[in-house]
Image: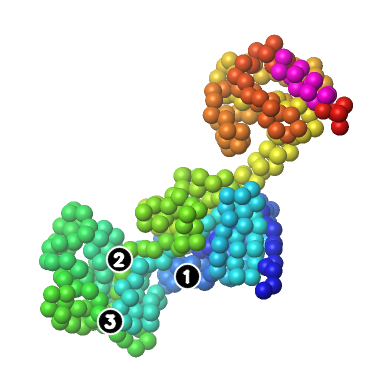
Amino acid sequence: MREKKREEYDVVIIGGGAAGLTAGIYAGRARLKTLIIEKALVGGLATYTNEIENYPGFPEGSSGLGLMNLFKSQAEKFDVKFKLTDVKTVNLTAEKKTVETFRNIYEAKTVIVASGGRPRVTQSKNEEKFLFDKGISFCATCDAAANTDKTVMVIGSGDAAIEEGMFLSKFAAKVIVSVIHDEGKMDCNEIARDQALANPKMEFKWNTVVDSFEGEDHLDTVVLKNLKTGELDPVKVDNCFEFIGYVPNTEVFEGVLNMSKQKYVITNEEMETGIPGVYACGDVREKGLKQVATAVGDGAIAGVNAEKHIAEEEVFENQIMQKEKIGMIYIYSAIDAPSRELLPNLQEIEKEYEEQVKLNVIDLYKGKSLCDRLSCDVEPMTIFYTLNGEVASVSTDCSVPAVKKQLNELVAEKTKQGSTA
């Protein structure tokens, strides 16, 4: 078996939906060498939506494919590269992260997980034939207007199903809801249930599941099966909406990233996963609203923070942990008067030692990630002393005599090392 080809990038983005494309635009515009890996169709699930009317800046609406093609063109404008393949394994904990596909191993300084997800489907007969633009949809917000004065079916009775069903009723002539439970029982909250039951446009089929989807080029009938009697009920519809859950594409990240019980990646508001240099954005992360607009916001944050991480890594390696001189890294807070007032004293000490000592100053709050790299969880007015690019000691005694004493010891040690080299 031939050895896999290796390629190096600043940023590797796993997933080419709205979130991944946005992250790519930001990273590419920052002149980072960026790769987007997409296993299916660039643009993700949004490409299957006939019309998107709620994305800002497009008052006349846009097809999902048209909008995603604009995203892709903009990413390509900033020299973002694309690979249409599936990710097999990842190593995200090493300093140089790797993303492995069938033929290649991509090495990256940062990785952005934007692998999105897929709607849970009923797995009923003929379902695949009508998915997305042929009668089965998964987004009422996206496709409600296209169903004005039509008859639609909603599968499911959770919060999403009932709330989306009520939204559809503003447009459709009739909304038929298939519910797996006995009459009056739903999985949604009680307020939504009561409102749905009182909605004159909504009709309920209790104790039913989908047996099959029927039609020629487009869905026209959903055949429901009664769970108690086994009776089949063919229901004529123009379109069907499935709201029975969502499955994130996170299989390859299991045991690597922190996930919820539903296997969504858990991040903070900065899209950080807890592994330095690894971010997650879009529908793959644990969050509430999953829309193109929210995916774009996530992707922007992830792209900016990837750029920031790379820049800070270079600063940390080349400036903070430099090897040429004895390092004096002062951690302080700009809003803490005593630590702020000490800064001129340390600058004078650096001058006294001429070319032997280098002072680096880090604001405890603005430079949080740099402090994290130093494992600094102490109060302001802390000095890290380095020798040959490694931390030699840490002290919260920042008085002038204490600082000079520590520096004298390190100067002596460095001199000794030089004489024995």
Residue type for callout 2: Ile
Q: Which residue is mark 1?
A: 47
* Residue 98 in picture, x, y percent from top left: 62, 57
Q: Which residue is mark 3?
A: 212
Tag 2 or tag 1, which sits nearer the N-term?
Answer: 1
Given contact means CB atoms under 8 Å apart, are the residues at marks 1 and 2 in contact? no
The residue lying toward the viewer, choosing from 138 and 351, is: 351
Residue type for callout 3: Ser
Report the Cα–Cα distance between label 3 and label 2.
16 Å
* Residue 266 in picture, x, y percent from top left: 44, 49
The residue lying toward the viewer, choosing from 391 and 140, is: 391
Q: Residue at x 61, y 22 (%)?
A: 382
* Residue 350 in picture, x, y percent from top left: 76, 20
Type of colouring? rainbow
Tag 3 or tag 1, which sits nearer the N-term?
Answer: 1
* Left or right: 264, with 245 as reference point: right
Note whether 257 is above or below 130 in the view shown.
Answer: above
Q: Residue at x 22, y 74 (%)?
A: 209
**Split into 4 quadrants, where in the image is the N terminus?**
bottom right
Q: Residue at x 61, y 33 (%)?
A: 374
**Split into 4 quadrants, where in the image is the C terminus?**
top right
The residue lying toward the viewer, choosing from 202 and 38, is: 38
* Left or right: 343, with 154 as reference point: right
* Residue 230 in picture, x, y percent from top left: 15, 80
The local crowd at label 3, few if under 14, some if 14 to 19, many if 20 or more residues have their Cα within 10 Å, is: some
